[in-house]
Image (cartoon, rainbow, N blue to C red):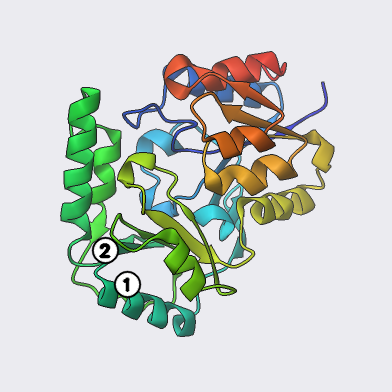
Amino acid sequence: MERKAIFVDVDGTLLTEHGHVPDTARDAIRAARQRGHLVFLCTGRSLGELWGDVLAVGFDGIIAGAGSYVEVGGEVLAHRTIPVAELLPLIDYFTGRGVEFKLDTNEGVYASPGAPDQLRATLAAFLSEAGGELSDGYGKFADVMVTGENLIRDDVNKVSFLDSEVTLDEIRTRFAGIFDVIPTSVDFFGANSGEMSLAGVTKATGIATVLEHLSIAREDTVAFGDSHNDLDMLAFVAVGVAMDSAHPDVKAVADRTTPSPDDHGIHAGFEALGLI
């Protein structure tokens, strides 16, 4: 079998409902790499939200911040941050409308004053209903947030905002042509939660950077995803695989599906494609 470049989303794809890496997923990724395939994280998270249990799986590179940051074998190939001139109006808008938000950077996650408490409350409600504890994997989202710091920064990869009365359509209209606005990749954050990246920066552009650097043909690519920030990725690669638990829009662009992370979907998908 020809060597494949495999791109794996994190939330809702690699991680279970409670935010953990299944042993079967870890074993599948390691087995694929042992067979000579290259496996990359391709996530909306920035490096500041990629904690040890995810990175410990072992990858050949990372596409983070929904395509804003790309590294292969420790070499940084691209890093496109939000200009301060574009960030300032965004912060003013969210502050004025009472929307809690966080700025995702490679060094850390910098949040508006009320964001950690709102997120903890949301997580506690979700995990209680799902039978988990706040200390489970997703609880770290709130723990890594830093407040009280200057939010006017030049190292921001992506902006995420929490649920509020302000709709995604309102935000899209306000920042049309500057930012792409999509629903959150973590559904239980709330219906009006979302992510904002510089217009035209996607996981697909990150993948294209990797392929050019490694001289890998597009027909030798596979990707696994579940949410709106995976749409471009799944449409771009030769074989796009959606999790069974994926949003219907994601399944519509995928070439095939695989079980949810809790049902060992990564392992099943790798096996079905002959990667392991």
Q: Quadrant of residue 18?
A: top left
Crowdedness of circle 1 by 10 Å Cα count: few (<14), some, many (20+)? Answer: some
Q: Which residue is mark 2?
A: 100
Asked if the residue under mark 1 is in contact with the one under mark 2, i.e. CB atoms within 8 Å, the reply is yes
Q: Which residue is mark 1?
A: 94
Query: Is residue 168 placed above or below 215 in the rendered structure?
Result: below
Q: Residue at x 67, y 33 (%)?
A: 254
Q: CA distance from mark 2 to mark 1?
A: 7 Å
Crowdedness of circle 2 by 10 Å Cα count: few (<14), some, many (20+)? Answer: many
Q: Residue at x 35, y 77 (%)?
A: 93
Residue 12: where, in percent of width, then height?
Answer: 45, 33
Left/right placement of residue 213 relative to residue 109 reads right
Left/right placement of residue 67 relative to residue 47 reads right
Numbered disc 1: secondary structure? helix
Q: Residue at x 64, y 64 (%)?
A: 200
Residue 208: where, in percent of width, then height?
Answer: 73, 52
